[in-house]
Amino acid sequence: MRVRAALLDADLGFIADGVLSWDATGALTEVGAYQGGPVDEDRRGELLTPGFVDAHVHAPQTRIIGRATGPLLDWLATTTFPEEARFADAGHANDVYARFTRALVRSGTTAACVYGSSHPTAAGALFSALDSAGLRAIAGPVWMDEGAPSPLCVAPEVSRDTVLALRERYAAHPRLSVAVIPRFALSCSSRAMALAGQLAAEHDLLCTTHLSENLGEVQAVRERFGNDYVDVYADAGMLGRKTVLAHAIHLTERDWRRLSDGGVIIAHCPDSNAFLGSGTFPWTAARDHGVRVALGSDVAAGRSFRMGFAAAYTYDNALRDGATLAPIDLFAALTRDASAALGLPGGRLALGRPADVVAWPMPPWADDADAVLATLLFDADAPVASATWISGRRVWTDDGRPWWSVVREPIAR
Ligand SMILES: [Zn+2]
């Protein structure tokens, strides 16, 4: 068998020709070149990486990937809101969420910040699906009480109670926690926004929403609230270190200073920004203001669950904005840095860390770090993960079936 040099970086880590073992708690006890003796997984011939983190994804939009009805506000009204309204039906929610979780682990994503639909019952279904799939997630229902069709609108007190119930139910869960997710300013009344900000602060919960994605949206926020977009969230007490703001494209210098002072995290969603014609993310402004940036697939405005594509489009976006990113930094953004920003325990192949690991097929010429990163992040035709583990549990083995397939129990005779 062809032997490759180990590519282990002590701080970051991806390994060619490696083996894996873990203990009863799912923490890594061995990772790297084979030293002899029994191991839990022999993945020599493949590449091992930490699992990827998707900082922004919408589970109820799983079936509408690629629906070309943008820009943003048209896409929401024509395609997204009608699909999300179907999640009032628990059977529909269970079915779609099973496909959603399969799509994540197949893509090498082991942790995600997940938006649900607005329905309390579907929020329960989302948590059950994430739990059975073995995923690590920060998730919750989206809060919407106006600016959307009435079947999607839920009183903010009900959204608050749903979050509190999930918080209690999953308080001791090793992988799942609940987030406060006011969808965006246009779908929330001032009261909903205030309640959401208050709830997140009181219980120290992660709070996530969309910010300044599209110029029509920015204008509508100004007309509705008589205020700048960032001010609307600042007024609700939502600009803190546990706040994740998706997109953040159309911002002033003053906005950037406020985001920087608040210590927020931006979820940069480059494919979605392109597909909905939202614009180029000002990468250099975020960098110059020291604002943390994680990457999101933003399915279904993003057209793939694969975070390698998000990294590739981030590279393209940054070039348009005058910055050249190093592939290794993009890899860090998907793993170590996103885990640290979201307070997740994975992100590194290091002893004692959770065995959140992905095995990837590699072409024969990928024999140094540059070639490995080229395949992993930039080759759109490279295969999906061959296997994925979370806390040592195998949650995915490539079976060649389409991503939307779910395994059904065989009919008993
Ligand atoms: Zn989004």
Image (tube, rainbow, N blue to C red):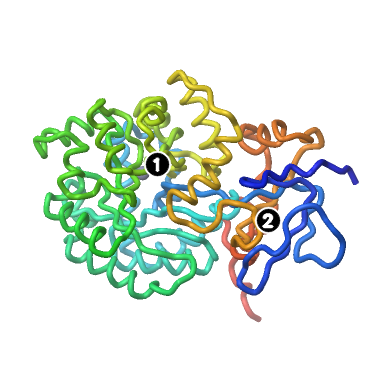
Q: Are marks 1 and 2 in contact (CB under 8 Å)?
A: no
How far from the left and from the top, in percent, is residue 210?
30, 42
Kind of residue at badge 1: Ala
Q: Residue at x 33, y 30 (%)?
A: 249
**Residue 313 vertical position relative to residue 106 in the rendered view, above or below:** above
Viewer-closest of 112 and 236:
236
Apparent side of residue 344 relative to residue 159 in the rendered image (left or right) = right
Q: Is residue 167 visible?
A: yes
Q: Which mark is residue 89?
A: none
Q: Which residue is mark 2?
A: 387
Viewer-closest of 188 and 55:
55
**Seen from this angle, which residue lies furthest left?**
226
**Residue 329 vertical position relative to residue 88 in the rendered view, above or below:** above
Does mark 1 have its CB less than 8 Å from ligand 1? yes
**Dot in front, 1 or 2:** 1
**Residue 189 vertical position relative to residue 27 in the rendered view, above or below:** above
The answer for how far apart the CA atoms under marks 1 and 2 are is: 26 Å
Q: Which mark is residue 267?
A: 1
Kind of residue at badge 2: Ala
**Seen from this angle, which residue lies furthest right?**
1
